[in-house]
Amino acid sequence: MKTTLELPDELMRHLKVRAAQTDRTLKDVVTDVIRRGLEAVPAASDTDPLQAWAAKLVTGADGSIRNPDGIDDLEFFAALDGIREQSRQQSPRDPFADAG
């Protein structure tokens, strides 16, 4: 499939150098880099703590969902405390501001 991408000049130069160094086409290098990026597991710091917690949940055959760490999941509660603290630092939003 053909597509057009706008890439920063410095990134494009880096890709062209990589292609020349490895004796491959630019298309092959870009495809390889994108494929490896999509297959990479995000680092813990890149993952939203709540999404990481939700990924650990186990769904039973009956559709029930349970946390294998039980209620003692300290990482979840630490992440929740962080979210609460961020929320406290922001001005409350006006629920009627968008009502029209």
Image (spheres, grey):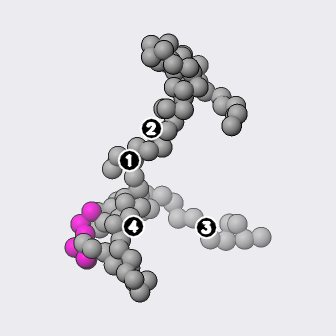
Q: Nearer the viewer, mark 4 or mark 1?
A: 1
Q: Position of residue 36 (x, y in %)?
A: 45, 38
Q: Nearer the viewer, mark 3 or mark 1?
A: 1
* Magenta span: chief secondary structure: helix
Q: Which region is colored magenta?
A: 70-75
Q: Quarter of the image holding residue 7?
A: top right
Q: Quarter of the image holding residue 84?
A: bottom left
Q: Position of residue 42 (x, y in %)?
A: 39, 47
Distance (Cα) linking label 4 and label 1: 16 Å
The mark nearer the N terminus, 3 or 1, is: 1
The amino acid on which the numbered mark 3 sits, given as a three-letter code, is Asp
The mark nearer the N terminus, 4 or 1, is: 1
The amino acid on which the numbered mark 4 sits, given as a three-letter code, is Ala
Q: Secondary structure at mark 2?
A: helix
Up/down of 83 relative to 42, above or below: below
Residue identified by numbered label 2:
36
Q: Magenta stretch containing residue 7, yes or no?
A: no
Tell me the residue at 67%/71% (across/down).
96
Tell me the residue at 45%/13% (across/down).
21
Up/down of 100 relative to 52, above or below: below
Up/down of 48 relative to 74, above or below: above
The mark nearer the N terminus, 3 or 2, is: 2
Residue identified by numbered label 3:
94
Q: Magenta stretch containing residue 73, yes or no?
A: yes
Q: Nearer the viewer, mark 1 or mark 2?
A: 2
Q: Which label is found at residue 64?
A: none
The quarter of the picture where the N terminus appears is top right
Residue identified by numbered label 4:
54
Distance (Cα) linking label 4 and label 3: 29 Å
Distance (Cα) linking label 1 and label 2: 10 Å
